[in-house]
Amino acid sequence: MTELTAADRAVMIEFYHISKQYQEGQWALLDINIHVLKGDFWFITGPSGSGKSTLLKIIFREILPTRGQLVVDGINILRLPDHRIYKLRRTMGIVFQDFRLLFHKRVFDNVAIGLHVLGVPLKEIRRRVFNALRLVNLHQKMWEYPSHLSYGEQQRVAIARAVVNEPRILLADEPTGNLDPELAAEIMGVFKEINKQGTSVIICSHDKELIRHFGDKILFLFKGKIIGKEVLPSSKR
Amino acid sequence: MNNLWQYRTRNLLSITIICLSFLILGVFFSLSNNLQYIADQTSENMMVVFFLSPDATAAELSHIEQRIRSSPYVVRMNRVSSQQAWERFQKNFPELREILKNLGTNPFPPSFEATLQKKAFMSNEILGFIEDIKNTKGVEDVQFNRDWVQKMQSLSRLARAIGFFLGGILILASFFIISNVIRLNVFARQGEIEILRFVGASNTFIRLPFLLEGVTLGILGSTLSLGLLFLLVRLFPLYLGHSLGALQEIINFRYLSLSQALGMVVGGVLMGGLGSLSSLSRFLKI
């Protein structure tokens, strides 16, 4: 099978001069221009307050930029009316640092929530939830409550929830922030596995060790500005 | 249903308040129905009684009878002699029989009893007709209790108006209670709502369960009030016995009509739905 070159791959996310200002005179992001291709694996790194999370929030339309345009999968999402944002989010999976699991629901229900939203039949939900949990190696704990799981396992449930509907884009905000190095590497392995299936992955992290080990494309932010981009040889497919 | 059960204490409280609000409305409607029923029954057999002079000649009586019978307002007419009136009184009021005997004479005058058409009964023309007969020679007095029926109908309208007023105030209060209960439920499920938003749930998908919760509370509360009202209509007469005597008929409850009962349930649905919507529009920003 012939692998696609970067030139052949479709552009998934295009930032055109994106800037974000929360307070007068303080730019959280300033003139960001990047293109994320289908199947890309990006790390966005920088110190706290550099604008990493803001960038992610703009992608899934949690917030609007002050200036610039953003095209996701061919759609200018800044022109998307509020009542249609849900359609954009159905193409994405989002993993948060604090997991945001529902602790009164079992692992299965936590992962299945996105499929219920899409109206997927129950039989299909069972199959896809099982596959997603197998991907993160948690299929044997499907009927447990999240509170009975370890920290790393909870994070893997959050990842399974993000990938269960086979999103075109996966966004993760400090997904290994509180994990020990072994667990962090394990989680990164899962992201790589998902990326291999064609999903564009964008991860915000300030874990230099992890980035050096797993990074393909790296964007360095400092005080809202891009101060560097790095494309490592492994990303040249 | 899961959500209703999860927050059962506050939901039970709101169902109770909705139920009491609709029950108060229902009680006054039920009282009003009874008064209207009495008024209808009375007007159904409404009669004018023309008391005749004992000295009236046969020709005068025949003339009066002919005039009454020829009136378009009269459905039928009976002639009641003094003797018949005396016997009727004894039959209806046996406890007063001795008093009558002690009188030594028959105090009841003969009369013509004219049953009126229902339509004509409330018209103004009937008053002219009665006045006309009253002034005819041989007629001593007239008994026409239209005022009494009118009073019953006014009382019925009053009971309904009080029901609307009190019930309305309480239903408005219930509306705010539902609105607040839904608001609390929204706050309690803020985390879940946020996750639903991130996995691509539409506004309708997120709002519908809350809307259904409000509607369910409204239906349960109003239906429960209908059940309690049914029990009240059945048990109230048993509780009261005969202690109220003649007032028993008036102070009583009658079942709601089907349209009234359905109206209350629909009212519950609307109140629950609108209460939820008002809360969702203010507190659930998606």
Image (spheres, grey):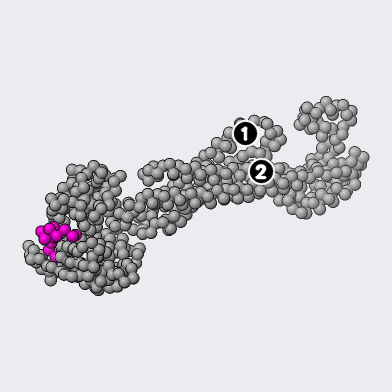
| Nearer to the camera, A106 or A25 | A25
| Nearer to the camera, A40 or B67 | A40
Residue visible at 18% across and 63% down in the picture = A45
Give the quadrant of the C terminus of chain B: bottom left
Tell if the residue under mark 1 belongs to the same chain as the one under mark 2: yes
Give the secondary structure at mark 2. Answer: helix
Q: Does the magenta segment cover residue A119?
A: no
Residue visible at 76% across and 50% down in the picture = B73
Residue visible at 58% across and 37% down in the picture = B233
User: How would you rate the neighbour count of disc 2 (Cα within 10 Å): few for under 14, some for 14-19, many for 20 or more?
Assistant: many
Which label belongs to residue B35? 2
Cα distance in 3D space between marks 1 and 2 = 15 Å
Q: Which residues are magenta?
A: A205-217
Q: Chain of mark 2?
A: B
Q: Mark 1 = which residue?
A: B237
User: How would you rate the neighbour count of disc 1 (Cα within 10 Å): few for under 14, some for 14-19, many for 20 or more?
Assistant: some
Q: Quadrant of residue A177?
A: bottom left
- Residue B241 in sight in this render: yes
